[in-house]
Image: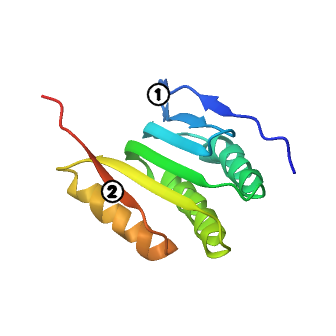
Amino acid sequence: MPDIKNIYIPEIRNIYVSPKVDFNAQTGICEISGESFLEETNKFYEPLVAWIRDYIKTRKPITLNIKLTYFNTSSSKWLLRILYILSEYKRDGGKVTVNWYIFKDDIDLIEDIKDFMEDVGIEIKIKYYENES
């Protein structure tokens, strides 16, 4: 089995925005939050995909919490890739939970999530934030 280390990347905001990432190898809880509008999406997401591939080799349960309020098209392709990997793991008997946190009035994001579920064939539980006043 690979020696899996936690991944923590703080959110970075400048011309481009990278999300906060917190992947915990002990608990199997993985969180991507904030916004994902990157110049070099591959460089950012490839290590996350590799981490997930290594983690599922342990056959432990995994939970992905997505708390993205915005993501661009290239980021969505990487999110789909992650969801495909988790879907395959679930089909192979792995325990997978995917939660996507959204604001109740974000109709566009709800449609995107439904499209992801249809494309990937994995259940994504939609959880709601309360709108800030």
Q: Nearer the viewer, residue 20 or 90?
A: 90
Please identify the quarter of the rendering in which residue 44 is found: top right
Residue at 57 percent across and 55 percent down: it is 78
Give the crowd class for mark 2: few <14, some 14-19, many >=20 residues within 10 Å: some
Residue 72 in the image, given as x and y percentages of width and height? 43, 49
Give the crowd class for mark 1: few <14, some 14-19, many >=20 residues within 10 Å: few
Residue at 56 percent across and 40 percent down: it is 39
Residue at 78 percent across and 58 percent down: it is 57
Q: Secondary structure at mark 2?
A: strand
Looking at marks 2 and 1 on the same chain, the residue that comes earlier in the sequence is marked by 1
Residue 113 disc label: none
Residue 88 in the image, given as x and y percentages of width and height? 64, 71
The amino acid beneath tag 1 is Ile
Q: Secondary structure at mark 1?
A: loop
Residue 26 in the image, given as x and y percentages of width and height? 68, 38
Please identify the quarter of the rendering in which residue 33 is found: top left
> Does residue 30 sit above or below 56 in this rendering?
above
Left or right, 123 with respect to 56, comes to: left
Q: Nearer the viewer, residue 63 or 112?
A: 63
Residue labelled with disc 1: 15
> Does residue 124 sit above or below 32 in this rendering?
below
Number of numbered discs on residues: 2
| Model colouring | rainbow
Marks 2, 1: nearer the viewer:
2
Tag 2 and tag 1, C-beta contact below 8 Å: no
Residue 126 disc label: 2
The outermost residue toward the left is 133
Left or right, 51 with respect to 109, comes to: right
Which image quarter is the C terminus in? top left
Work out how far the residue at label 2 is from the one at label 1, CA to CA, in angstroms.
30 Å
Residue 10 in the image, given as x and y percentages of width and height? 55, 25
